[in-house]
Image: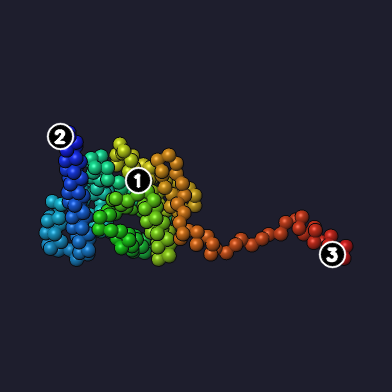
Amino acid sequence: MVAAQWLASASLMAMVMGGVAAAFYLLGRRSQAMLRATHSTGGAKNNETCQQTNNFSPPGSDRLEIFTGLDSREAIEGTIGFLLALKARYNNEFSLVLAEIDHFETFKNEHGPDEGNRVLRRLADMIRESTRDTDAAGRFDGQEVVIVLPETSLEGACNFGERLRHAVDQGLPISISCGIATAADGDTAKSILSRADSALLSAVSAGKNRVFKHTGRSINLVTSQVTEQVLEEAEPEPTIPTLEAEIDDENAIVSS
């Protein structure tokens, strides 16, 4: 009986501690969201706000990528590490979306670097508008963005990725490809990012403007109601008459 009571108390304490850790993470993300909202204003007030929010942020999350206002690569890797620690201790799930702008270098060469920069900033704005306060988005390379979705399953991340892909395709003069992975037991930041990257490479190889997921065992195309509707509305390819059909038509004319 005493052992059972102790186990119940220990389980309750673990749940409480998990909730406390999650609450501090949430506070840190909301503080960062407020900082991004004032990103373009600059000045001493921004610096003071940044210093005040650092105490509630996971390691590295105090650094923003200046150009887009998204998290820097170091910051997003720190966030992933923080969430992996929560998963190891409290089994909290989370997923990643690795998005890449399709043909971005070609777009900049054709339309100029200024237009390329404008599109990149608009994409960052669109990602911020699409994510929750608890989510994190960071610029990894020139044309890659990582979006971290806490408390989100692989299916939920796939739905998000497909909605974002469709929104970009409809609202911007570019498209994106996405690779999605969810955290597994024993993961490191490198391993989960590697799975997301493998899924992204599959999306690019399949023709771009697609979303692929890594299940841990296989890589599959993500389809959704949005995708199916687009395919249904697409015009059918014209039928090209075959040589046999032309011969049949000629024989029918002769016999008549």
**SS type, badge 2:** helix
Q: Amino acid at mark 3?
A: Ile
- The residue drawn where x is 45% and y is 41% is 218
CA separation in Å, label 2 and label 1: 39 Å
- In the image, residue 182 above or below residue 28: above
Q: Quadrant of the N terminus?
A: top left
The reply to whether discs 3 and 2 touch (Cβ–Cβ < 8 Å) is no
CA separation in Å, label 1 and label 3: 64 Å
**SS type, badge 3:** helix
- Sequence-earlier tag: 3 or 2: 2
Q: Nearer the viewer, residue 253 or 6?
A: 6
How crowded pointer 3 is (Cα within 10 Å; few <14, some 14-19, many 20+) is rated as few
Q: Between tags 3 and 2, which lies in front?
A: 2
Q: Which mark is residue 2?
A: 2
Q: Amino acid at mark 1?
A: Thr
- The residue drawn where x is 49% and y is 49% is 206
Q: Between tags 1 and 3, which lies in front?
A: 1
Q: Amino acid at mark 2?
A: Val
Q: Which residue is mark 1?
A: 182
Q: Which residue is mark 3?
A: 253
- Sequence-earlier tag: 1 or 3: 1
